[in-house]
Image: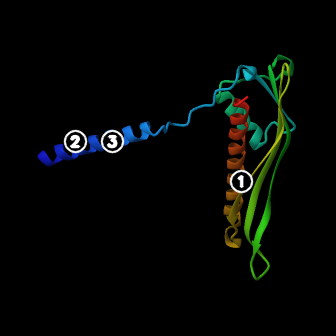
Amino acid sequence: MRASRYNQAARLLLMFVLLTSITSCGWQLQGRTRLPEALAVTYVDAKDRYSDFTRALQEHLRASGARLVSDPLQATAHIRVLRDESGQRVLSISARNTPQEYEVFYIVEYAVSGVGGELLPVQRLELTRDYTYDEAAVLAKQREQAGLRAALARDLAAQVVRRVASL
């Protein structure tokens, strides 16, 4: 009985010390990004409104407090997605001349304008990830590639929102 009370007290003390040290170093949970007032009502202009990037961008904007509209005349800001491209490249091949590693890439170009004019000129972002290829697991590797592509799109959308928030 006495040992369990000692263990419980030691755990509480350890949690208190950890929480105190984490908060004292400035660490905090990642929250939503606060957007400037100019982006309160935003129109996203993209050729492919259902691409991984466009959907992720819209989700990040909503999470940051922007109200997205489908009519550009109602918007106080326009985010134009000029390029939304993804694909893969071979990184290495085996002695049998078959791919061993691929690189998945995602490239976006965008610009932001407001009521008063251009807020952010054309920006280009590119992210890449690589993965190994296995001929015996083609379907699994295709799923891995799709997952990497979606993760890259989410990361790019988060970068765009952070850059826009800094205006």
Q: Secondary structure at mark 2?
A: helix
| 3D distance between C-alphas at marks 2 and 1 | 48 Å
The image quarter containing residue 145 is bottom right
Residue 1 visible here: no
Can you identify the residue that label 3 sits on? Answer: 17
Up/down of 99 relative to 59, above or below? below
| Upstream in sequence: badge 3 or badge 2 | 2
The image quarter containing residue 40 is top right
Question: Where, quadrant-wise, is the C terminus in this rendering?
Answer: top right
Image coords of residue 135 (percent x, y): 71, 72
Q: Residues within 10 Å of mark 1 (few under 14, many from 20)?
A: some
Up/down of 91 relative to 18, above or below? below
Question: Where, quadrant-wise, is the N terminus in this rendering?
Answer: top left
Which kind of residue does numbered mark 3 sit on? Val
Can you identify the residue that label 1 sits on? Answer: 146
| Upstream in sequence: badge 2 or badge 1 | 2
Which kind of residue does numbered mark 2 sit on? Ala
